[in-house]
Amino acid sequence: MSRYTVEITIHRAQHVPVGDILNCSSDPNIWATLHPRNSTPPDDSFQGQVLKYRTHTVRSSLEPVFDCKWIVGGIPESGFALGLRLRDEDPGQFFRDDRLGEGVVLVPGLGGKLAEGWELSEGECKIGKRKGAITSHISTYVARIISRGIIGHHTKVWVSVRVLGKSKVLKDDPNRIYTLGPRKQTGRCDG
């Protein structure tokens, strides 16, 4: 089975739920998890490995632009599931980040296979708010009423995926997936 190096770009989000009712805004970031898919039936099952990535935080925005690139190696041709968790950052040690919702992108889609040159250009991922905090639900609906419908409530994130080529297979663990870059999150993503 072939293994590939993949570039994932998390572009932007739209209609982010309100995390701060006083400002009618949020400080959103995205926590991404990547689970490789098995090549044997059932095709949508996942192997035990998980990679994690976090975008930078965009301050005071309901329409944040991230344009963050994450490069991952060792991806099987059967693809992966990309979990996206939208969070509202609350700075300080006494506050927890608010959950704003989550969604999943299956790459390359059920029944498909990755190959050199494969690309998903700005695919749309709907973010379900059922997994979000109740306070963000209430804040969003109050802000929507106050703004007379200007603040939206159907959250989406746009993601691109591009196969860069075949991956180096690790001798000690040929099925291992690994992050090639960026190595650590600084204030902004490389774009």
Image: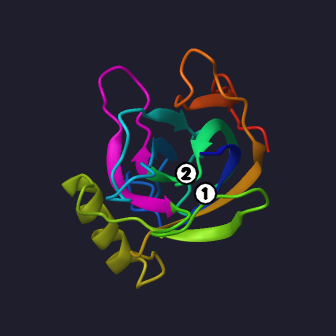
Percent coordinates x, y for residue 4 in the rendering: 68, 44
Residue at mark 1: 64
Which residue occupies the foreground of this view, 5 or 53?
5
Q: Confirm whether the magenta stretch covers residue 131.
A: no
Q: Residue furthest top?
A: 172
Secondary structure of the magenta portion, mostly?
Answer: strand
Q: Secondary structure at mark 2?
A: loop
Percent coordinates x, y for residue 162 in the rendering: 72, 56
Callout 2 environment at 10 Å: few (<14), some (14 to 19), or many (20+)?
Answer: some
Numbered circle sitting on residue 101: none
Q: Amino acid at mark 1?
A: Pro
Quarter of the image where one finds residue 101 = bottom left
Q: Are marks 1 and 2 in contact (CB under 8 Å)?
A: no
Describe residue 163's horizontal placement relative to residue 147 as left or right.
right
| Magenta residues, start to end | 84-106
Distance in Å between CA atoms under marks 1 and 2: 9 Å
Viewport quadrant of the N terminus:
top right
Q: Confirm whether the magenta stretch covers residue 91.
A: yes
- Relative to 60, say whether 152 is above or below: below
Describe residue 140's horizontal placement relative to residue 108 as left or right.
left
Quarter of the image where one finds residue 174 = top right
Residue at mark 2: 60
Which residue occupies the foreground of this view, 169 or 65?
169
Q: Residue at x 40, y 65 (%)?
A: 127
Q: Amino acid at mark 2?
A: Ser
